[in-house]
Image (cartoon, grey):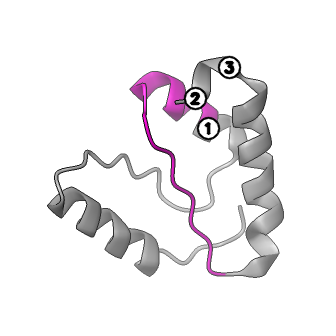
Amino acid sequence: QGDLHDIGKNLVGMMLKGGGFQVIDLGVDIPADKFVQAVKENNVKIIGLSALLSTTMSGMKEIIDALKADPDTLP
């Protein structure tokens, strides 16, 4: 959370789509609970996170911890 930059995320998403992957883009500044919900609803196999600012790394850790805490979210 806290990072509103999306250029890198969008570029990677476009490249993955071009490679045949289905990409579910949640946008920017997404809280951990919404991320967990989206993972459960979409039965994902690969999870990607992106950040430009190092200050947002703690938010990324919160998402990772929330995913690890719920066995239904691990691919």
Residue 27: x percent and y percent? 47, 58
Q: Circle 2 sits on which residue? A: 37
Query: Residue 15, percent across and down?
Result: 25, 68
**Which is nearer the eye, 12 or 38?**
12
Q: In this rendering, would 29 be left or right of 19?
A: right
Mark 3 or mark 1, which is nearer to you? 3
Q: Are marks 3 and 2 in contact (CB under 8 Å)?
A: no
Distance from disc 3 to disc 2, alpha carbons, whole Å, reads 12 Å
Q: What's under tag 2, amino acid-wise?
A: Gln
Amino acid at dot 1:
Lys
Name the side, left or right, on which 21 lies relative to 73: left
Q: CA distance from mark 3 to mark 1?
A: 16 Å
Name the disc covering residue 56, or none: none
**Relative vertical location of residue 13 with respect to residue 36 in this rendering, above or below:** below
In the picture of the structure, the residue carrying the numbered disc 1 is 34
Q: Which residues are magenta?
A: 36-52
Q: Residue at x 72, y 68 (%)?
A: 2
Asked if 10 appears above or below 31 in the picture, the reply is below
Q: Name the residue tied to disc 3.
A: 71
